[in-house]
Image: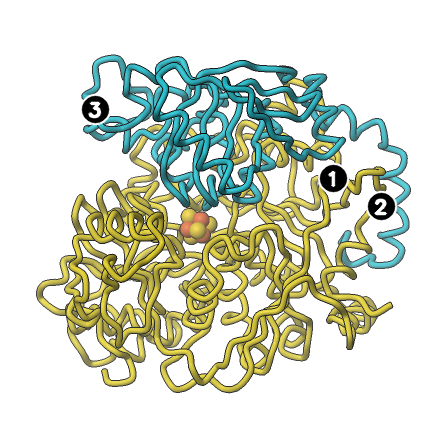
Chain colours: A cyan, B yellow
Amino acid sequence: MKAFTRLNGLVCPLDRANVDTDAIIPKQFLKSIKRSGFGPYLFDEWRYTNYGEPGMDCTNRPKNPDFVLNQPRYQGAQVLIARDNFGCGSSREHAPWAIEDYGFRVIIAPSFADIFFSNCYKNAILPIVADAGTVDRLFKECEAAEGYTLDVDLEAQTVTTPSGFSFKFDITEHRKYCLLNGLDDIGLTLKHADEIRAFETRHKAAQPWLFA
Amino acid sequence: MAKTLYDKLWDSHVVRQEEDGTCLLYIDRHLMHEVTSPQAFEGLRLAGRKAWRNTSIVAVPDHNTPTNHWDRDIEDPISKTQVDTLDANIKEFGSLIYFPFKHKNQGIIHVIAPENGATLPGMTVVCGDSHTATHGAFGALAHGIGTSEVEHVLATQTLVQKKSKAMLIKVEGQVGPGVTAKDIALAVIGKIGTAGGTGYCVEFAGSAIRALSMEGRMTVCNLAIEAGARAGIIAVDDITVSYLEGREHAPKGEQWSRAVEYWKTLHSDEGAKFDAVVELKAEAIEPQVTWGTSPEQVLSVGSRVPNPANEADPVKRASYERALQYMGLTADQPITEIAIDKVFIGSCTNSRIEDMRAAAAVAKGKKVASNVKLALVVPGSGIVKRQAEAEGLDKIFIEAGFEWREPGCSMCLAMNADRLSPGERCASTSNRNFEGRQGPGGRTHLVSPAMAAAAAIAGHFVDIRQA
Ligand code: SF4
C-alpha cells in the first residue's frame, strides 16, 4: 500500500448526501476480477450520458457537463468533499478502488458509512469526519474560489484551508500507523500468529461444533 | 456486570487488543461469492499464502448467475469469467461447502448458509457483502467486509476491528394482519434513517420480534445495513434452536445438547446498558412502500408522496426534489395511484419459503394486471425452490402469469440479465432502491412479498389489507 503523510490538494465538492457505492461505481464494473482500472468509471452514471460497460474506452464518451467532476476547474482534484453518509450501501471495495484510481487521496464529509470508511484505509485513502458546519464552510469556500486547495497533515491530524483556518480530525493509532508507513494489515497480524493459534485451540475446546 | 448480546459475542472472539482499542477478532465462518472474492484470492496467491482455515469457508456464485435457460450456461463472457474464477479459487484453496452454478442447492449466499446449518448462534460470520447482517438473526455477530478484509480473513482467520456502540431497537406489541417483518424493518429505517445505525451494532428485541419466524428475523437483520448498522442481532430462543435442529452442518448428538445449552445464554442480560434505545409500537406499523431513492424514503401505503415544499431543511428538500424527479413522481400523489411496470419477488431479503408462501397466497386464482410487463419470482436457493414446488406454489405463480425462475440474486442488483429498462417502475421485495440499482434509470419501490404480489395483480400499489 502507498504511504500517506501529507497532501496539499485541489478540492472537488460533491454536494449530495447519501452517496451510495452503487453510484460511486455501478454494478456492471464489479464483474472485473482485477483491482485496478476503475478510475475512468468513477460515478459513471452521473459522469457520462451514455451507458458504461466494463472495458470501454472512456476518452470519447459523452460527458454530463453539469456533473462536478467534469468541470475544468476541478480537474486534478485530490480531495473530495461530500455530505452525510458518504459511501452507504454495498460493501464493494471497488468504490474506494475507483476513487483512488481516479486520483483522490482524501475525502471529507460529516459522516461515512462504516464499511466504506474502513475500506478506504486499506487503499491509502484518508476519510476525514468533520462536523457539518465545517464541511459547509469548506463547500462555500471551495465554490467561491477557483483553485481552492486544502492542506492535509496526517501526522498532526489537521486540515488547513488557504486562509489559515485549521481543524483537527480523529483517527485510531493503528490506522494512522498503517497509513503513515504504507503497511497493510495482513503482515502485521501474522506477527501474532501464535496468539491466533492459541485462541483457536481454546475456542475449539469450548465450542467444538464450530470446527466441524 | 450485565452484558449485552453484542458484548458476549465480541468478548468471546477477541484474540488480542491494542491500547487504542483496536482488536483482532477471530472469525468462525467466512461466506463468499464471486464478486468480492477474486482480488482477495489473487492477493493471497501473490503473497504465497494459504487459507488459514479453509473449513470456515462457505461459497456460492449468486450475483452473476442467470435465472433461466440454464442449459445455455452463462452467456455473458465477463460474468462467466467471474464465476469460473470462483470455481478455480475454491478448488485451489478449499472450502467446507461449495455449490457451483447449477448445483441443486445453489442460491444466494445469505439464504444457503442458514438453511444448511452453516450459520450458528455464537459465531462470528463475515462475507464480502453488506447483507451479511442477515445472519445476526441467529444470535451470531455477522457483518459485511471489503475485499482487503476478505483477504485478511483468508490469511489470518481474524479481522482488525474496533468495537461499535450498541443500540437496542425494541418493537413491542403485535403487528396487524398484512404487516410483515419487511414492514417492521422498513418502518425502523423510516424512523432512524439510513445513517441512524452508523457506528452501532443493533439488537432487535421486543415481543413483535420474538414472534417472528427465523425467516422473518433474517429479513429484519438483513435490512439493518440499510439503517447504517454493520450488524443486526437477535437473541437466541426456542425458535432459533428448532430451526437449526437436524440441518446438515448443525451439531449432532452430545455436541448438539452442549451447543444448545451454550446458545441459550446468547441474549442481553437484564439491566445491560445500551448506548441508544429506540422503541416502536408494533400496532402502529402499517404496510410500507418506499417512494424515493433511499430506503429511508418510505411511507405507509395509505400515504401520499411527500411535497418537498413542506421540508424546512434545504439539504433534505433538495434530496426530495431529486428523488421525485428520478422516480417520475409528483408531490402529494397517493401511493396507491402509482402504476408499476415490473415486479420482482426475490433477493436475500425476501426469497425464503415463507416469502414464497406469502406471495403465492395473494396470487392464488388471480391474474397479473395487463400493464405489468414482467412479474418475476426468484426463489433464494435450490432448497427453497424444491420446497415451494412440493407445495405447488410454482403452479400458482405460473397460472397467475408470474415467471418462476432458478435461484440467484437476479434483479436485486441486476448483474445478470434480469433488469429494469430506463424509466421502468418496479415493485420489489429487495433491499435497495438506489438510482440504477435494478438497471440504469430503473425505479424501485421496496415492499413486502405480499404487497409486491398484490401490486402485480392490481397493476399499482394497493393496501394488502384491502386486497
Ligand atoms: S440478493 Fe441482492 S442484496 Fe442479497 S446478496 Fe444478492 S445482490 Fe446482494
Seen at 68% across and 55% down, the residue is B165
Residue B61 appears at what percent x and percent y? 47, 43
What amino acid does circle 3 point to?
Pro
Residue, disc 2:
A200
> In this orientation, which residue lies closer to the viewer: A176 or B96?
A176
The residues tagged by marks 3 and 1 sit, at their Cα atoms, a distance apart of: 47 Å
Seen at 50% across and 17% down, the residue is A162
Badge number at residue B157: 1
Q: Quadrant of the C terminus of chain B?
A: bottom left
The residues tagged by marks 3 and 2 sit, at their Cα atoms, a distance apart of: 56 Å
The residues tagged by marks 1 and 2 sit, at their Cα atoms, a distance apart of: 9 Å
Instruction: Nearest to the eye among marks 3 and 2: give it.
Output: 3
Seen at 9% across and 63% down, the residue is B371
Relative to B269, B181 lies left or right: left
Residue B411 appears at what percent x and percent y? 32, 50
Relative to B365, B282 lies left or right: right
Q: Is residue B399 visible?
A: no
Above or below for B227 versus B234: above
* Label whose residue precedes the other's in the sequence (3 or 2): 3
Badge number at residue A65: 3
Query: Quarter of the image holding residue A12?
Result: top left
Residue A79 appears at what percent x and percent y? 48, 22
Q: Determine the secondary structure under disc 2.
A: helix
Q: Determine the secondary structure under disc 3.
A: loop
Q: Do the CB atoms of the residues marked 3 and 2 lie less than 8 Å apart?
A: no
Query: Quarter of the image holding residue B93?
Result: top right
Residue B288 appears at what percent x and percent y? 34, 70
Q: Quadrant of the N terminus of chain B?
A: bottom right
What amino acid does circle 2 point to?
Glu
